[in-house]
Amino acid sequence: MLTKLFQSRIAGCRTKSVNMDIRYIQDGVPKPIVIFSHGYKGFKDWGCWNLVASKFADAGFIFIKFNFSHNGGTDEQLLDFPDLEAFANNNYSLELDDLTRVIDWAEKSEDIPSNEKDLSRISLIGHSRGGGIALLRASADRRVRSIALWASVSDYGVRFPYGDALVDWERNGVYFVENARTGQQLPHNYQYYLDYQDNIEQLDIRGKAKILEQHALVIHAADDEAVHFSEAMRLAKWIPNSQLIILPQGGHTFGAKHPFPGDELPIYLEEVVDTTIEFFE
């Protein structure tokens, strides 16, 4: 069977684009759709995500991954963060809207023939910050059948500066976080915090988790250095229909890094992918 791989671009928020790539086996059989949301300082082609996409396609899924419109990439340069102005003006509400647009496209676009897609089986995967976005979207979207949360955060509010740092952010209008890999100082405009405060109910992961009707797989590594595994335990406690898996090792990206030199998944990420495929099936 021929695996079809193509790229597409749709309108995102505030004149920015959402760039996607789509993989599936062309066989005329309706296939479930999986949509993957990357995390903070991430992008769709980071590390092993292409290998992940191929494995899902080989397993009989349509796999869609995309760059959030304000993740710092551009239409010409999809990797890393050439557009720091866009990065500075990103926020959770924009990412939530971008994911909605991708689901709409998957449902309505004729770029994926109707005989190839099973619209009754749309699932979301979110890694790290993208896990929260996936959960929030699923809680309000009956088109989504199930979700998988990979090393997901459980609360957005606690990730903002506080105390004097928050006062300085408001006064200066921007604060910076260094990207250790690229050496860039990544800007965050104060609008990021204001948008969260203005939309705090819509962006309440805990509140939305408690009313989530879909089944959820929550998978995390015990040695995650970026998001403590206790966040996974909280998510699994809140979500009524959840399955929790804590891996003994793997770190925040389950053994992957960027750039990734090999053509096989790290053992921990392979376990995550295999478990998620079984869960979605």
Image: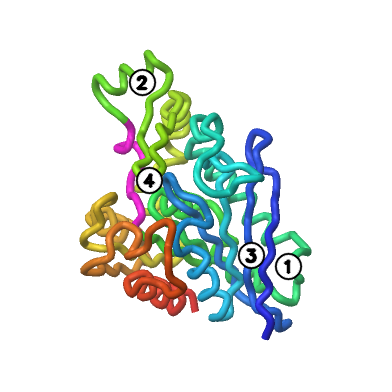
Residue 169: mark: 2
Q: Check the image and report above or below for 87 versus 227.
A: above
Residue that label 1 marks? 112
Q: Which residue is mark 3?
A: 22
Identify which amino acid the numbered label 3 is placed on.
Ile
Q: Which residues are magenta?
A: 151-160
Is 153 a magenta residue? yes
User: Residue 59 at x, y = what percent?
Assistant: 54, 81
Left or right of residue 263: residue 150: left
Going 53% across and 51% down the picture, which residue do you hit?
A: 140
Can you give x and y, in whole percent of width and height, for residue 12 in the image? 65, 42
Q: Residue 48: x and y, percent?
A: 45, 64
Front tag of 3 and 4? 4
Quick check: 256 left or right of 122? left
Q: Residue at left 48%, top 69%?
A: 52
The residue singled out by tag 4 in the image is 181
Label 3 – label 2 distance at C-alpha: 39 Å
